Image (spheres, rainbow, N blue to C red):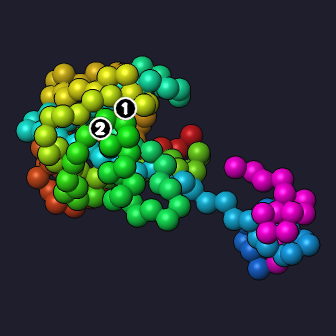
Amino acid sequence: MIMNYCNNCGSKIKFGEVPGESLPRYFCDQCHTIHYENPNMIVGCLPRWGDRVLLCKRAIEPRKDKWTLPAGFLENGENVEDGALRETLEEANADVDIVRLFSVYSLPHVGQVYLMFLADLRNLNFSTGLESSDVRLFTKNQIPWDQIAFTAIKFTLEKFFDSTSQTNGEAILGGYTKY
Ligand SMILES: [Zn+2]
């Protein structure tokens, strides 16, 4: 993510104190642009069908062969729901209707925030996408709990199968990993 050259004027970028800023920043002292770096958003769905949820087996690194929910980086110009639907289509060829925001999970040490949406599968015509080697429905007891790729996804699945959270209409906040 660290740039060497200013995307505004092409000069070499510096890093350090900038007047008016509380944190050191990447900046260009030729055109005075501050190049902010902020966390990335990862958006995805928790697709459900009865008492089962759809998981994808990762075909790519990182965490190849581990299981995850369909999710990926939000693109510029995209709203979060559209991003979650796009990732669900790309990774699982699954058509879903978003029900609501389900969980928010922060990973401050790597600058990521997950937004996961509860979604209803429209049908069972899902299949592997480019980044998946398998796509399957799992009940709570069938889920390979020790083979889940990411902590934010494990958190989301655990909350879903906690009966209180499943019936509660509000998003689960406060999920957080600190290293
Ligand atoms: Zn510049």
Q: Which residue is mark 2?
A: 93
Left or right: where 86 falls relative to 8: left
Residue occupying image coordinates x 32% and y 28%: 128
Tell me if residue 14 is in the magenta stretch.
yes
Question: Is label 2's Cβ within 8 Å of ligand 1?
Answer: no
Determine which quarter of the picture holds residue 121: top left
Per the image, is 158 magenta? no
Question: Residue 143: percent from the left, percent from the top?
Answer: 24, 25
Residue at x 79%, y 69% (from the top left corner) = 8
> Quick one: quadrant of the C terminus?
top right
The residue wearing badge 1 is 129
153 or 164: nearer the eye?
A: 153
For the record, the magenta segment spans 1-19
Q: Name the residue located 69 percent from the left edge and 65 percent from the top edge.
A: 36
Above-or-below relation of 156 to 104: above
Give the crowd class for mark 1: few <14, some 14-19, many >=20 residues within 10 Å.
many
Disc 2 residue type (three-letter): Asn
- SS for callout 2: loop
By secondary structure, the bulk of the magenta-drawn segment is best described as loop
Q: Amino acid at mark 1?
A: Gly
Residue 91: image x %, image y %? 37, 36
Label 2 close to label 1 by CB (< 8 Å): yes
Q: Residue at x 16, y 24 (%)?
A: 141
| Alpha carbon distance from label 2 to label 1 | 6 Å
Q: Taking 63 as reference, is 137 left or right?
A: left
Q: Position of residue 87 (x, y in %)?
A: 38, 45
The numbered disc on residue 5 is none
